[in-house]
Image (spheres, grey):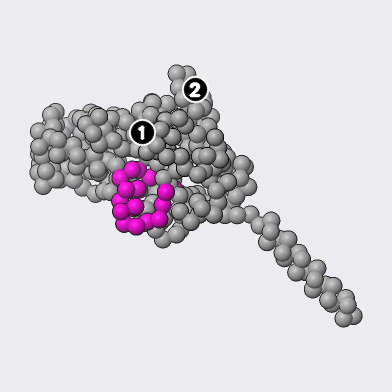
Amino acid sequence: MKQYKTTKIITAVAAMLLASSVATKEVTIGYMGMSNPWKHAISEKLIEKETGYEVKWRRFDSGAKVMTALASGSVDIASAGSSPIAAGVSRGVEIELVWILENIANAEALVVHDDSGIIAPSDLKGKRIGVPFVSTTHFHALFALEQFGLSDKEVKLINMQPNAISGAWQRGDIDGAFIWDPVLGRIKQDGHVLITSKTLSSWGKPTFDGLVVEKSFGKENPEFMAKVIKIAADLDAEYRDNKESFDETHPIAKSISKISGSELSTVAAALALYEFPDFSSQLSCVWAQCGLRRWRRQIT
């Protein structure tokens, strides 16, 4: 009887050890609503299939909220704009930029309502402009005002999340907004573009969206990170290779519509506003400051 109990205990312990050794690793990844090929990875569970990790996806309305989640440890990897990333690093958030999801270019713009009376930048004085604070559009809004010879005291910048901007626009509570898709596409229907991020970038202040990882997670999961970056790179290449014929029938377009909430018919036009740097560009001095990241070495 004693030998039977001992054998039973050993068997139970062995089973527990085996179960722990094959337990699925978990990762929480944050994302935002802009249109990009990365949404196809979410929709089709490409990371789960390629790595075997269990992925918990969390959607955020702003990069500022993404940084708060990374700082608290509730998210391991996330996408965010260059401004909140820079703000997060300056506040001591332990993150590392691993992939440029997109050069924002024309995908963010200052749009003013057709009934606002705003034709030239000087007409912005005294107007109400919605913008998510600590975002790339906030950064460019302030830079634009500086270039126009205006201050944020002369132009009322109102801190609003994208969905709030959409509602405020419809109610007539704001005269303009500096925002991205899908809201950008909606307000363009009865508004006009005053200036884009591409123009402001050409004046010396570029912006982008990037994929960042919490440093300790990245260090502990190098093979996983290499696979994630390869998935992102392959999706960007798929879009670039088919850009001329890309339309709503493409699987990536359908995924973007599903995950971001954009109208399927508008996805191709929204995507065309961005620029998606290829692998060589990302490893060049333009983006990576001439340095190769450890995960990228594993891919190449």
Out of 63 and 237, give the one closest to the viewer.
237
Q: Quadrant of the N terminus?
A: bottom right
Kind of residue at badge 2:
Asp
Taking the image as shown, residue 91 lies to the left or right of residue 77, namely: left
Give how far across and how far down residue 266 sits, in percent.
Answer: 40, 28
Q: Residues within 10 Å of mark 1 (few under 14, many from 20)?
A: few
Residue drawn at 34 percent across, 57 percent down: 92
Kind of residue at badge 1:
Val
Please tell me whether mark 2 sits on a helix, a strand or a loop: helix
Please tell me whether mark 1 sits on a helix, a strand or a loop: loop
- Give the number of the disc on residue 241: 2
Range of magenta residues:
78-96
Asked whether residue 111 is in view, the answer is: no
Out of 232 and 166, give the one closest to the viewer.
232
Asked whether residue 159 is in view, the answer is: yes
Out of 190 and 289, give the one closest to the viewer.
289
- Give the number of the disc on residue 286: 1
Most distant residue in the bottom direction = 2
Give how far across and how far down residue 196 sits, in percent.
Answer: 25, 31
Residue drawn at 80 percent across, 68 percent down: 11
**Residue 95 is inside the magenta segment:** yes
Residue drawn at 87 percent across, 81 percent down: 2
State the CA–CA distance, disc 2 to disc 1. 22 Å
Give how far across and how far down residue 156 sits, in percent.
Answer: 15, 45
Give how far across and how far down residue 197 sits, in percent.
Answer: 27, 33
Q: State which quadrant residue 177 falls in.
A: top left
